[in-house]
Image (cartoon, grey):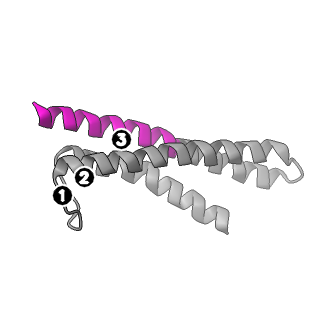
Amino acid sequence: MLELVAMVCAAVLVVWTPIEARKVAGGWVRKRHKGTPAEFRAAYRKQLALFFWMGIVLGLGNLGLAFAFDDEPARGTVKLVAGALWLGVSVSAFISRRIVDAGADAAAR
């Protein structure tokens, strides 16, 4: 059950991260943020870096576990899917970081 929750969260992150990154690149700032849009972009960029590394660690960890324990084929398949989703989070965070950087460059001009 816990693996299912993790896979759903990873799938949501894969879809939601680029959507929110486009909003941030356009100048959107959360209501609770006390500061300038440039400061918010910098904080959001740090968050995307966290998602990037978290996706790599969890993705490679799940892929490693899928191949390390071959006792149940279904469990290995679930681990492969979870690993692929978390690697997708990493790719999504990388692409989103580029989107935010492009927005920062456009705002600086």
Q: Count the marks.
A: 3
Asked if residue 9 lies left or right of residue 101, the reply is right
Asked if residue 63 lies left or right of residue 47, the reply is right
Q: Does the rendering let one see residue 4?
A: yes
For the point 23% across and 68% down, the residue is 32
Q: Name the residue under label 1.
A: 35
Type of amino acid at the residue the image marks with label 3 = Ser
Asked if the residues shown at circle 1 and circle 2 are in contact, with their CB atoms under 8 angstroms apart, the answer is yes
Type of amino acid at the residue the image marks with label 2 = Phe
For the point 77% across and 47% down, the residue is 65
The secondary structure type at the circle numbered 3 is helix
Q: Does the rendering let one see residue 23?
A: no
Instruction: Tell me the distance, in whole angstroms, between the alpha carbons under discs 3 and 2.
Output: 15 Å
Q: Mark 2 points at which residue?
A: 40
Q: Which contiguous range is marked in magenta?
A: 88-109
Label 1 crowding class (10 Å Cα cut-off): few <14, some 14-19, many 20+?
few
